Amino acid sequence: MTELGQELLQLATRLAVEAGQMVRDGRSARGISVRDTKSSATDTVTEFDRASELLIVGGITAARPDDGIVGEEGTSTDGTSGISWLIDPIDGTTNFLYGLPGYAVSIAAQSATDTEVGVVYVPATDELFAALRGHGATLNGNPIRCSTTAERSMALVATGFSYLPERRAVQARRAAALIPQVRDIRRLGAAAADLCYVAAGRLDVYYEEFLGPWDLAAGELIAREAGCRSGSLDGGPVRPSSVLVANPWLFEDTRALIARIDADLAS
């Protein structure tokens, strides 16, 4: 996979940067408006989400016409090559809409067995996080590793909340019970970027529920390649509906703590 992996990594890198710079510069030059909504009135889609997906899909199709592609904004193409792509053209659209810096372009390439390549580009800070399975993770070409924080009380934890109010209410009660146990909690607004920040040691733990596969794929590989552990909140393998990523010293402790909090809230 190494030669193919390098090809996939170079393609994902080029397209993520092109798309990210296009949406950043386009917003600055022309402004922005909401074009549509999805799961709720606050789950928005802009013209730039769609333009970014078109750019990325077009680039993949031109370079690798036999690959499968799934994008958040509706692209769904079956492939025959054994490689499929997961694209989030703007992860953190609410941040993008409001002019906040915490949004990202996320591109992952997967084989039948695992995610092979993950690239996350954060346009506002011009940061490119990338990983090739088995070859470590990088930030702007330099190797990164997760933190070594081992004490729960010193852990900086990130999470996210659902667009659906009834889910947010439950998640907020969990966060309220968790926050006295850790250093602090951050809610930055883009899962792909949060995963990369754990990979780079800027955060110690990240957990969230009800993601899409395009939110998770690239950043989860980058985090694993930086030394993190990943899984679900209920003790199984990581999946979009249940995500826990942390450095190895905090992973099991955090999972057990969240399980106790959830049990207390349910009782």
Image (cartoon, rainbow, N blue to C red):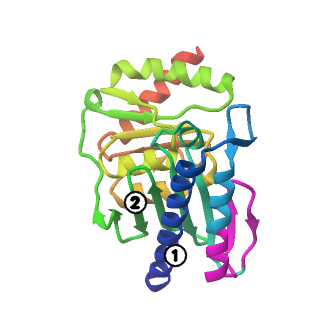
- The residue that mark 1 highlights is 11
What is the quadrant of residue 177 in the picture?
top left
Instruction: Give left or right: position of 36 versus 174.
Output: right
- The residue that mark 2 highlights is 129
In this view of the protein, which residue sits in the foreground, 153 or 235? Answer: 153
Seen as rendered, the residue at the extreme bottom is 3
Seen as rendered, the residue at the extreme front is 29
Residue 130 x, y percent position in the rendering: 41, 64
Q: Is residue 217 above or below residue 202?
A: below
Label 2 CA crowd tier, 10 Å (few <14, some 14–19, many 20+): many
Q: Secondary structure at mark 1?
A: helix
Query: In the image, what residue occupies the spot 62% across and 53% down?
Result: 213
Q: Is residue 258 above or below residue 233?
A: above
Mark 2 and mark 1: Cα distance apart in space: 14 Å
For the residue marked with disc 1, what is the amino acid?
Leu
For the residue marked with disc 2, what is the amino acid?
Phe
